[in-house]
Image (spheres, rainbow, N blue to C red):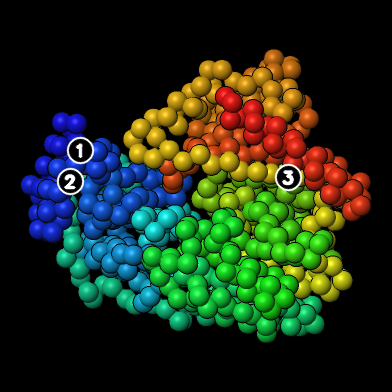
Amino acid sequence: MSEVKEKAQRWLDSKIDEESKKQIQDLLNDEEALTEAFYKDLEFGTGGLRGIMGMGSNRMNKYTVGMATQGLANYLIQTYPNEQIKAAIAHDSRNNSRFFAETTAAVFSANGIEVFLFEELRPTPELSFAIRHLNCHTGVVLTASHNPKEYNGYKAYWNDGAQMVAPHDKNVIAEVNKIHSADEVKFEAKEELIHSIGAEIDQLYLGEIKDLSLSPEIVQSQKNLKIVYSPIHGTGVTVVPQCLKQYGFENVYVVEEQSEPNGNFPTVVYPNPEEAEALKIALSKAREVDADLVMATDPDADRVGIAVKNLKGEFQLLNGNQTGSLLIYYILKRWTELSRYKGGEYIVKTIVTTELIKKIAERFNVDSYDTLTGFKYIASIIRENEGKRTFIAGGEESYGYLVGEFVRDKDAVASCAMIAEMCAYAASEGKTVYELLIEIYEECGFYKEKLISITKKGKQGAEEIQQMMLNFRETPPESFGGSKVVRVVDYQNSTDTDLVALKKTSIDYEKSNVLQFFTEDGSKISARPSGTEPKIKFYISVNKPLASKADFEKTEAELNSQIESIESDLMSL
């Protein structure tokens, strides 16, 4: 506690503004709140800097944003000593996002860095595009993605338009850690170095997305498909409706109650398309207009959730594994039909994402890569293969997908366009999207997944999560759902252990606190603490062959039972 108070006092002794000092003084009267605000510094996780807004070293505020930017600026100046460094900045609809974006712009410019600041809120993928188009050395988007309204965040990008990976992320943190006071941050903006950008970038970005289209004639024949879209009070409203119109869809219903950007996200508990509750209003609208497709994007429009009619004609939410599988199947199938393959094409997914995507790639003789969780690792594979191989598409189970190479982060704007096109393609063949999914299961195997997230907040929660992972390593489970564990992959210790052959091999991944258990019956169970939220996540994946559409419900019930059994085993550990 003495260390926490000392850190708080250092902040009080610095040149921060009087209102901030008053907030710290108030915290000194609440030991628990003071500890949560100062017990550590915000760190870069898989999604960059992210935290609850408020005063303190462990909070998102003007000074933590300023110190992160000063550290990034220092690293850029060291890395590019004889260049005019350029940075692009965007922000979402969250409370304080514009203020934090302007703070970031001020600090960059004060350090002699030329800044391209979006005039108002824009999607994260458009920021990635802008970095590449404007030949920037870095970029920052102020967003906490789909976190609750109390949060904000700071995603830092490198010159390829991707979030920073090693060694840059660690080097930037090292520079940030050298800054012991807000007094070391240059906050005085050089206005002449700050340029406003907007509509001109929108048009270029939307033009690239339009060029992804594989079935313009089919879209034209299905242009009256009824699509309901919700931006969930976020940035998607700035470009997604325009993008769908540009593709040729003429029957798009934007959910009015959620169309206005609002950092309080008044109509939802969490602004997360992974949560069924977030799509409740959109589904109501879909039933009203008898829609063919429902789509909703998160506040910074890098994730998209969808709903389609199931075999009973009822709207059903699809999870990220199902949507990703559909999207990649559609794209690879169209590439085949259009004779696009020249050799060297590939797709990428993360290690916790369904193995069905790998099976689909095999079905079309396309290579697939696995990466750690976090889209920056998918972008890293694209960078390594640039100019040598052709990236077609990639995705992760957490509702993030990417098509094409002009963006280097998950892109819900392009994904909305391609999902709508995929829906049109299915309709042109007399099928629903759900029937197309069942066909994929028949061809490649019926894979079913479930994500379990356990929230453990604060310092104590973080310690409990670490202890859970330690227990898994010291006493690994022998079976799940009645099936023996035959293989364990530990990404922290870089080992792959075959428990049948009693053989241990090393794996070539960046170290990450992830454990995976593979069972005799082909199930995969992954355990991973979140890099951006106070959660530990368990990913369950089971599979069986699907003989025919007639067996769908029976096989699905068997897989659901298998998942329940594995979940029961996990909860008893």
The outermost residue toward the top is 502
Q: In the figure, 424 relative to 184: above or below?
A: below
Image location of residue 561, percent across then percent down: 75, 37
* Disc 2 to disc 3: CB gap under 8 Å: no
Considering the numbered disc 3 on the image, is that residue within a helix, a strand or a loop?
strand
Question: Label 2 vs label 3: CA separation?
Answer: 47 Å
Residue 39, given in percent of the width and then of the height, sits at 25, 37
In the foreground, 568 or 87: 568
Question: Given this view, does label 3 or label 1 mark the residue nearer the observer?
Answer: 1
Residue 544: mark: none
Neighbour tally class for label 1: few under 14, some 14-19, many 20 plus, Cα within 10 Å: few
Q: Quadrant of the C terminus?
A: top right
In the image, is 457 to the left or to the right of 29? right
Q: Please determine whether, in this image, residue 142 is positioned above or below residue 354.
A: below
Q: Which residue is mark 3?
A: 448
10 Å crowding of disc 2: few (<14), some (14-19), many (20+): many
Q: Is residue 506 visible?
A: no
